[in-house]
Amino acid sequence: MAEFKYDIVQELGVLSERSGWTKELNLISWNERAPKFDIRDWSPNRSKMGKGVTLTLEEVTALRELISSLK
């Protein structure tokens, strides 16, 4: 499996916590590329991460519009 690097540029917030793991929204630079919004689970000391999803600003904006249209 290929090695990858990441840098948490900005911690935006914790969405939930379960068994010590937190689901977080962060701005992360993957492999020294432009930062993207990232939602994923992290272990208590961030030594492990779960699967997540990364979104561009345009995708986050579209998601916000979809959520705000819910009734």
Image (cartoon, helix red, strand yellow):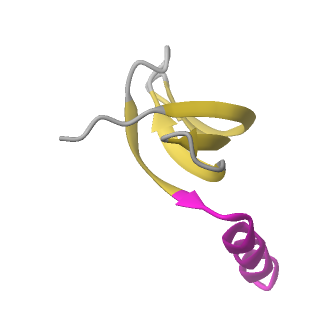
- Who is closer to the viewer here, 58 or 51? 58
Residue 18, given in percent of the width and then of the height, sits at 48, 32
Residue 70's place in the image compared with 47, above or below, is below
Residue 48 in the image, given as x and y percentages of width and height:
38, 25
From the viewer's side, name the closer residue of 30 and 24.
Answer: 30
Work out whether 5 lies above or below 58.
above
Instruction: Point out residue 32 in the picture as x, y percentages from the top left corner.
Output: 55, 39
Return the residue nearer the eye: 37 or 44. Answer: 37
Q: Tell me if residue 25 can be seen.
A: no
Residue pictured at 64% horizontal, 53% vertical: 36
Quarter in which the C terminus is drawn: bottom right
Which segment is the magenta one? 54-71
Q: Is residue 3 above or below residue 33?
A: above
Q: Is residue 28 left or right of residue 6?
A: right
**Is there any visible trace of residue 57 in the rendered image?**
yes
| Residue 30, position as x, y percentages in the image | 51, 43
Residue 62 drawn in magenta: yes
